[in-house]
Image: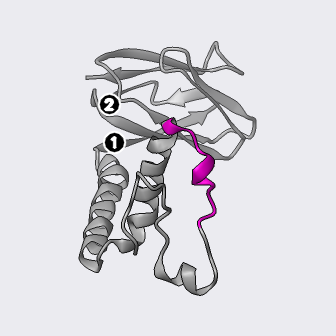
Amino acid sequence: MRQWDSTAKICPLPEWAAEVGGGCPFPFSRMPAYADSFLLQLRVTCNISAIDNHSQEAMRRSLAALLFVLVVVPQAQAESSFVLSIRDHRFEPTEFEVPAGEKIVLTVKNLDPTPEEFESTDMRREKVVAGGQEITVYLGPLRPGRYEFFGDFHPDTARGHVVAK
């Protein structure tokens, strides 16, 4: 690969470009003086192919480590699972404790033939459960406290609380 020459505004092309009759696609002779930063960026882009195999392998390993940290590590946080049932337009249990500061996976099973809604303004969740079906609701992490939930279709009977301790 040719060396960079910022004063002559020469485009560093790979060796194969000359063989196929390629020239520099950028009209550097007509570029204003402030375009030097563009030329520097072009130099970095054009020189990527000159990185040796050892450096490329190191870059691949670094990228793999970064992906592991961004994808796998957050999923390793503790999650607790709980099941809540709806029977005769009532939640069972009407109150249950969860660990504060952890993500919660709540499975809501509707044992009634009619739909019901799991709603909580405290936890900012609202989801309809069809009759005879179940849903998954993700909560938290919750601060210590008592959080109300209710069934919007039968709010007089379908009520309950999550207590985070």
Q: Name the residue under label 2.
A: 98
Q: Is residue 77 above or below residue 89?
A: below
Quarter that holds the C terminus: top left
Q: Under tag 2, what secondary structure?
A: strand
Residue 139 x/y as whole percent: 44, 32
115 sits to left or right of 12: right
Q: Which mark sits nearer the N-terminus, 1 or 2?
A: 1
The secondary structure that most of the magenta stretch takes on is loop
Of 90 and 103, nearer the camera is 103
Which three-letter amino acid code belongs to the residue tagged 1?
Ser
**x and y percentages locating residue 129 in the rendered image:** 67, 37
Dot 1: within a 10 Å radius of its alpha carbon, few (fewer than 14), some, or many (20 or more) residues? few
Query: Which mark, by number, is residue 62?
Result: none
Q: Give the range drawn in magenta.
A: 24-33
| Disc 1, SS | strand
Amino acid at pointer 2: Val
Of residue 115 and residue 100, the one placed in the foreground of this image is 100
Question: How far apart are the two marked residues, 1 and 2, measured between alpha carbons?
Answer: 8 Å
Q: Tell me if residue 9 comes above or below residue 33 in the rendering.
A: below
Residue at x 35%, y 29% (from the top left corner): 141
